[in-house]
Amino acid sequence: MTQTDTPRRRIRYAVPAAWYVGLVSVTSVAFDAMGQPEILAYILLLATFLGVAPAIFALSYPPLAFLGEAMDTGPSLFDSLPLFATAAVANVLLICGFAAFVRLMQRVARRESGQ
């Protein structure tokens, strides 16, 4: 098999993004295990600041639309995990999208300055 001239695209930011989502997930489980202390709530909200609004919409819309009523199962160690993990993933997607937009604008600027 011959090697091609095109470079392989590497995902450089996958490992830090996975660590970020993992740490937020572990912190949210600890948040529920400790009885939801106020200081940890502030830390989680600060860590997932921009992604909380899309996460609330993504998590609250489908149960209301498809299930009708939510079942009350009582408190659990994983109550806040879906919210904060989804918010962390939304933050990662926002940052990746912004970085792709900046790279596109740099390519356009280079192309325009070369002509």
Image (cartoon, rainbow, N blue to C red):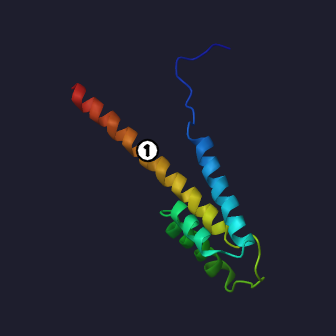
Q: Residues within 10 Å of mark 1 (few under 14, many from 20)?
A: few
Residue at image mark 1 = 99
Task: Please say if 33 is above or below 91.
Answer: below
**Where does the C terminus fall, quadrant-wise?**
top left
- The residue sitting at 52% across, 56% down in the picture is 91
Q: Is residue 70 left or right of residue 4?
A: right
Instruction: Say what secondary structure mark 1 lies in.
Output: helix
Q: Furthest-top residue in view?
A: 2
Write down the quadrant of residue 34 in the picture: bottom right
Residue nearest the observer in this picture, 86 or 32: 32
Q: Position of residue 5 (x, y in %)?
A: 53, 17
Residue drawn at 64 percent across, 48 percent down: 19
The amino acid at mark 1 is Ala
Give 60 or 34, whichever is nearer the viewer.
Answer: 34
- At 58% from the left edge and 58% from the top edge, which residue is drawn? 88
Q: Is residue 48 visible?
A: no
Q: Is residue 42 something one can see in this rendering?
A: yes
